[in-house]
Image: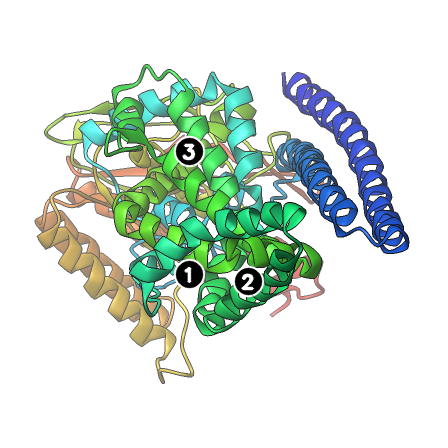
Amino acid sequence: MEQDIINDYTQRASFAKEEADKFKKLSNEYSLYRLVVFGLFIISVYIAAEADNIYIAVFSLIVLITWFSWLVKKQSHFETLTNYFLDIKKVNENEIGSIQSQANMYDNGAGFINDKYYYASDLDIFGHGSLFQLVNRAATGPGVVKLAQWLIAPAAKTVILSRQQAIDEIARKNDWKLNIQANLLFSLKQQREQIKNLVSYLKIPVTLEDEQWLKIYIALAPYILLAVIITGIFYVPARYFIPMIGLFNYRLVSSRSDAVKKTDLIAGRIGTTLAHFVLAFKNVEEEEWEAAYLQNLASKLKYGGESISGKVQQLSRLIDKLNYRLNVFVGFILNVFFLWDIKQIIAIETWKKNNREGVETAFDVVAEFEAFISLASLRINNPDWCVPEITDTEGYTLIAKNLAHPLINSKKRVANDYELNDTHKIDIITGSNMAGKSTFLRTIGINTVLALCGGPACAGNIKVSVMSVITYMRIKDSLNESTSTFKAELDRLQMLLKAVESDKKVFFLIDEMLRGTNSVDKYRGSKAVIEQLIGKNAVGMVATHDLQIAELEASHPQYIRNFYFDIQVKEGEMLFDYKIKHGECKTFNASLLLKQIGIDVDAG
């Protein structure tokens, strides 16, 4: 199954490369045609000078500019297609890398690492080798933030079910998913705050002195100049007014250069960016959605009775037109005839006044679709994973079959079953070093996080109630905050106890409590904490090496359950099966591990 998925992505990538090469060749050809047109213009100017006839130059100029503009448009189209297919190739190759080695060109979420979150650090939610690195397919800053928000807190049941439907639909539309990913891939190379800056730009007006008068003159200017040129054909003295009017027009544009530069400083850089977002908006608008959640999202891409893609495309074209000024020759001609720079600034400012509302909402819609696309990628790439069943039980429910850790290679990970059925229990898990206790806790935690954000889980099936996960695993000291390990542990315990009291349902995962103190205080403290948690009707798991903790089952038989991971020792070799079992651990391996590095515990 996995190889079939990889083969599909490989075929898509190969096709995309062929198409990119084809359009790259066409783009190069049209670039040569543009040079030919420019050469023809030089020749026409020479002929006009030899014949002492300005009208040959004017006629040639009009014809060749029209031809040149058409060639520019065609070349730009071919370049766009080239880049699109190159991005399609990258997107498909990224999926192959994700399946084979969990490599990912998208943000790994390292910027969200924060020990204050209930479970993010302990469960490897963010950073290198994290769940976020595995899942994320969001290229835009808002998309990355949206996915992170989904992963750091459980959603309500109705929201989870709506997300599951949306993810299921997108997972069935892999062509559409890869297409919009390619259209948004450019955003990986942009500044993280590009959308925020763009929205801010739309809210900041650029004013022109005498704007009303300029609007009138700009509308009349090309007709005035054309009339003088035609008059000059029949009345020679009128020809002297042609350069005078042209110079006046050019000077008028130059006098507003500050406003032009102000607009160009931001707008001049976002024309291409907007063109990409237009394609992404169209991807959403033109698709027929079945899931109610997606229908509602797509409906937000309507503003003033028109599609947001159409409105943003208008702005993109206006900015592209402003960028014609970057070609000195073309810019000079356009400003002489049409006062081009001023005309485009007025048009851009008019668009901003009429359309800036709704654009911010549209970007948020794209961000949410990116979060859905990310989780849908898990569904597509892991068809053996399940859609979690979300329950409404009064007690805690977490029932799983063949539950495994999603960040461990599929060929190496070991699956386990677990059952917590509409009840309140604390499970004590004992076992040897490296037998799998910590990994099992993280497996439970990370799959619960996936399930409660709406995503698939790495299991044959899983049933889970909505609850807040809180972990106590990788407790570290902090030199910056002058915090010892034991103090850090106390802070985490305090957070846990407060959460148990304040949150509706808290499911805790504790790995080796109170490591920062001596063995006597460790046992007494751990016992006291567990009994306090029982008193608060709390639910969760405690992994420990301390067999005395397992004895709590005798005094709390209705609340405590014992599980363990063990090892088999054959001819001095330790064999791990990483399977959870009921009861207390009887076999430990610390002495064997010490012997392997030359320390004989029995010798003393």
The residue that disc 2 covers is 245
Residue 109 position (above or below residue 116): above
Q: Position of residue 332 (x, y in %)?
A: 63, 60
Mark in the foreground, 3 or 2:
2
Q: Position of residue 488 (x, y in %)?
A: 32, 72
> Who comes first in sequence, dot 1 or dot 3?
1
In which image quadrant can residue 94 be found? top right
Give the number of the disc on residue 281.
Answer: 3
User: Residue at left 62%, top 35%?
Assistant: 91
User: Residue at left 22%, top 31%?
Assistant: 159
The quadrant of the picture occupied by the C terminus is bottom right
For the question of whether residue 26 can be seen, the reply is: yes
- Work out whether residue 561 or residue 288 is closer to the camera in this orientation and state it: 288
Distance in Å between CA atoms under marks 3 and 2: 44 Å
For the question of whether residue 433 can be seen, the reply is: no
At numbered mark 2, what does the secondary structure look like: helix, strand or loop?
Answer: helix
Distance in Å between CA atoms under marks 1 and 3: 31 Å
Task: Please name the amino acid that badge 2 sits on.
Answer: Ile
- Work out whether residue 502 or residue 456 is closer to the camera in this orientation and state it: 456
The residue that disc 1 covers is 113
User: Residue at left 67%, top 16%?
Assistant: 4
Mark 2 crowd level (few <14, some 14–19, many ≥20, 10 Å Cα): some
Mark 1 crowd level (few <14, some 14–19, many ≥20, 10 Å Cα): some
Task: Please name the amino acid that badge 3 sits on.
Answer: Phe
